[in-house]
Image (tube, rainbow, N blue to C red):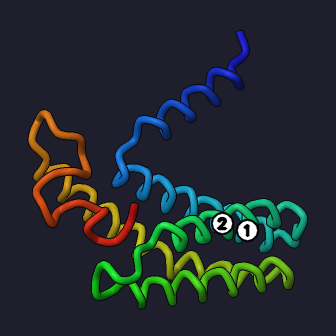
Amino acid sequence: MNYAALRTRYVDDTVATASPAKLLTMLYDRLVLDLQRAEAAQREGDKVAAGPHLTHAQDIVSELAATLEVGSWDGAKQLMSVYTYLLTELIGANVAGDAERTAACREMVEPLREAWHQAAQEIAVTATPLEPVGTAAPGRSLGDLGVG
């Protein structure tokens, strides 16, 4: 049995069927994981091992920025500034092999991840049993927060 293929299929199916709220929290979870892995590799002096994690983190931040609707809520412009700053720092951390810069990015992302998880939980609570999570109660979806 090809376990790698099964795992890939499982991940693909999970992503394809996830609500916008779940996708967002999954992206943030993976972003933190990439930053943790990159930081650990950098602290061991292994820039080569850190590189793919930092590049993937940059891809995630780019996706988060691309899906952010800046005009849809008051904090969106500030969040876009955070994403822009993170991209600059992640590139710099990768080029320099700087674990401290990577750690600073992780420390900036972790509270954002927690905030989005809380928002997703609140949306899930307000969803009725027959409506998909993320589409509940007008004004209560992540799309209304300018994400999605």
Residue 54: % across, % down? 73, 68
- In terms of secondary structure, where does tag 2 sit? helix
Left or right, 61 with reference to 135: right
Please identify the quarter of the rendering in which residue 118 is found: bottom left
Regarding residue 9, the answer to whether it shows in the image is yes
Relative to residue 20, is residue 99 depicted above or below? below
Left or right, 113 with reference to 104: left
Relative to residue 28, is residue 6 depicted above or below? above
| Residue 148's disc number | none
Residue 106: % across, % down? 57, 75
Residue beneath the point at 17% across and 63% down: 140
Q: Quadrant of the C terminus?
A: bottom left
Q: Residues within 10 Å of mark 1 (few under 14, many from 20)?
A: many
Residue beneath the point at 60% across and 88% down: 85
- In terms of secondary structure, where does tag 1 sit? helix
Q: In this orientation, which residue lies closer to the viewer: 31 or 17?
A: 17
Residue 124: % across, % down? 19, 50
Q: In this orientation, which residue lies closer to the viewer: 95 or 99?
A: 95
Q: Rounded to the nearest whole Å, what is the CA distance between mark 2 and mark 1?
A: 5 Å
Figure label count? 2
- At label 2, the amino acid type is Ala
Badge 2 vs badge 1, beta-carbon distance below 8 Å: yes
| Residue 57's disc number | 2
The residue to which callout 1 is attached is: 54
The residue at the far front in this view is 71
Relative to residue 20, is residue 65 depicted above or below? below
- At label 1, the amino acid type is Leu
Residue beneath the point at 49% across and 58% down: 29
Residue beneath the point at 69% across and 23% down: 5
Q: Residues within 10 Å of mark 2 (few under 14, many from 20)?
A: many
Residue 38: % across, % down? 73, 66
Regarding residue 101, the answer to whether it shows in the image is no
